Image (tube, grey):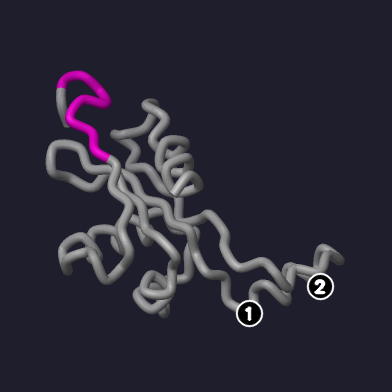
Amino acid sequence: MSERRGEDLQIHLRHYHAMDGLERQAFQQLVETGGEVRTDGLPDRMKAAHLLGYAMQNNRLVAVGAVKHPAESYVHKISQGSGYDLQDYTAELGWIYVMREARGIHLASRISKALCNS
């Protein structure tokens, strides 16, 4: 990390197929580090995502997020539980995770905003 937090920071938005193997691997690893996501099938869910976002600092991936395409079974479950018709629910923001040492400079907000504005 740089001496000044937030220095040399770049936010990237990519489709899965536009990422190289190292970017994909680092993205997946960081999502898994967050511990909130089922890891089985994650690469396939990454492929199906509308857009993947990540922050790089000093050539290191330090934060991730995505606009995901939710599975029909998930949409049905949420629809049943909430009582709302979610037929048109085609995208959701998720997989937001920031490495502990990169926290405090609003990376989650910055990635979320970039993804939502794309």
Q: Residue at x 48, y 44 (%)?
A: 117
Assess whether mark 2 and mark 1 are in contact (beta carbons under 8 angstroms): no
Percent x, y of residue 103: 37, 32
Q: Residue at x 47, y 70 (%)?
A: 38
Residue at the front extreme of this rendering: 118
* Three-letter code, disc 1: Glu
Q: Secondary structure at mark 1?
A: helix
Percent x, y of residue 9: 23, 33
Percent x, y of residue 42: 40, 73
The answer to whether 55 appears left or right of 7 in the picture is right
The answer to whether 56 appears left or right of 42 in the picture is left
Q: Is residue 67 magenta?
A: no
Q: Residue at x 17, y 45 (%)?
A: 60
Which stretch did the figure color magenta?
A: 3-10
Residue at the top extreme of this rendering: 4
Q: Secondary structure at mark 2?
A: helix
The answer to whether 71 appears left or right of 41 in the picture is right
